[in-house]
Structures are given as C-alpha cells and as structure tokens.
Image (cartoon, grey):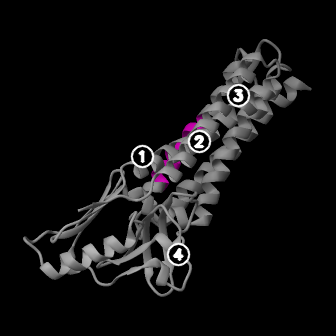
Amino acid sequence: MIFLPPKFKGLVFGLSGIGLILALDILLALIMRAAQSAFLIFISVCLMIATGPLLAWLAYRCYGLARARYILSRNAFVVDWGIRRDVIPLELIGEVRPGADFEEELRPRGITWPGCVVGQGDIAALGVVDFLATTEKSGLVLVQGPEAWFVISPEDPPAFLSTFAEMRAEGPEEKIEPESVSLSFEQWAVWRDRPALALIAAGGISVLLLFGYLTLLLSKLPPLVTLHFNAHGLPDRSGSPTRLFILPTAAALTWALNTLGGLWLHRSENERTGAYLLFGATLVAQVLVWVALIGLTTSLVS
C-alpha cells in the first residue's frame, strides 16, 4: 500500500525560491550587459556564481519531494525520496508511533522550509534520526529502523499506523533483504567540520577577491605590461594586461583541485590530516599569487 506525504506546500515554496533566484540571475545579466563599471560587472558575476549551488540544492530538494512516497507491504517498509530508496524488512522494524505523542522537538539539522523537512538530526531520546517528511510534529510518524529512526509524514497518520499493525500481524510473504541507496556525499563528515569548511570558504573567497582586485585595476594599467622577469630581475616577457588573469585563474584551479582532493580524503578518518594539508596548501598558494600579482601591478599603477 502506498502512502504519499503532503507535497503542495513544500513544492510551492521550493519552486517559488527557484523562480526568484532565476529572476535575480536575469536581472544580474541585464545589469552586466548595461554596466560600464568593471567593479559592478565583477559583483554581478560573483552573485550569479553564488546562486548556482543554491539553485542546485533547491532543485534537488524539490525533485526528492516530487517523488516522495512510503510503501507498506507484509514484507517491508519502503521509503522513496528522489533518488534515495530505503527498504527495511518489517521484522527489523522496532517501535512505530505518532510524532504527536513525542515530547521533544522533532527537527533536523540544517536548512528546511515549510513543507520540506528533510535531513538528519540527533534527538536525545532516539539517537540518530532521518527526517523524510513534509509536515509539522502533529502529522509525523516515527519508525524505528535497525540503525536509525525515520521520521515520515503520511497524509493520514492513523491509517498508516493501522495498516502497519495489520501488515505486521499477518507476517511476511517472503524474505526481503535490507537496502539503502542514496547520495553518500550528503552524509560526509566534512559538512559538520567547521575548520575544514572555513578553510574551503577562505580559499574560495580569496579567489574571488583576486579576480576583483585585478578587475578594478585593469582600466588603470597600460596597454602593455611586464608579465615575467628573468633571473637578474629584468623584464623578459610582456603582453596585454588581460593576460594577468592567468594568475587568479591558476589560483582558482588550485582551489578547485585541492578542495575536491581534500573532500575525498576527508571521508576517511585516517586521511583527515591529508585533507587539512590540501585545504591549507590552497591558502599558501594563494598568498604567493597575491604577492606576485600585487608586485606586478603596484609599480604599473603608481
């Protein structure tokens, strides 16, 4: 038997958010097209870049919500949520009870919006809890799995509880193996590691500032600038000032590669030191880029 969560409110909020961000991107594109100021163009580009991850996250959440359903049979309890699928044999399920009877607050960590209550939480009386729901506490049902609790929100909680009791009483028709398919990156420990996130964010901000610094100076630079000095400190290569953008571009590539490598290493507790070294090396490399860029441009501007 299939039970659907209430989806309308969550999809309205999610799709409205996507629409507002797309409208903002269109406005920023129009500003860039008409702008005469290099700094204004730079700020617009930064804002458009910043909206990319937010758009992807909203689209991912809306997709999960659109495909959300709970399936009950005599063999198993199944949760489908986007590309995530959890199959739990009924004999492995412990307690099942309405959320309205639970005294503590039921909220996951992280960002949610009305009609989309998704994420993990740590509830003192329950331990680790997976929230795959769309309603407030009164419409929730708590299902105790073998490793964690699930918090769900069927449209008719009493009917779900009654059907579950009937299915369990009848017993399984066949043996079902547990199954869990999800995007594992959502559970990576790095998302809860503030020092690691701070290093990653610092590197990304530094890259943007490098581009912004050079963009501001571009109109003040001569048409031909020195790009390289030989071992004796004499200029041996020159070119258009736009070629200086190779420095922040190299910094951006270093940040991207080191961040990806660090995220991969961070997945293992034994490799965390290597991850921090990569995140830190990004900042060291960017300090060198800053020194080189400032050294090349200061004398030209003055």
The answer to which quarter of the image holds residue 46 is top right
Q: Which residues are magenta?
A: 250-262
From mark 2 to mark 3, how far is it between C-alphas? Answer: 18 Å
Closer to us: 149 or 99: 99
Residue 16: mark in rendering: 2
Disc 4: which residue: 106
Amino acid carrying mark 4 in the image = Leu
Q: Quadrant of the C terminus?
A: top right
Which badge, 4 or 2, comes first in the chain's sequence? 2
Disc 1: which residue: 63
Could you tell me which residue is drawn at 47 percent across and 50 percent down? 61
For numbered disc 3, what is the local secondary structure? helix
Amino acid carrying mark 1 in the image = Tyr
Residues tagged 1 and 2 counted as in contact (Cβ below 8 A): no
Amino acid carrying mark 2 in the image = Ser
Give residue 245's position: percent from left, percent from top.
67, 26
- Neighbours of disc 2 within 10 Å: few (<14), some (14-19), many (20+): few
Give residue 10's position: percent from left, percent from top.
52, 52
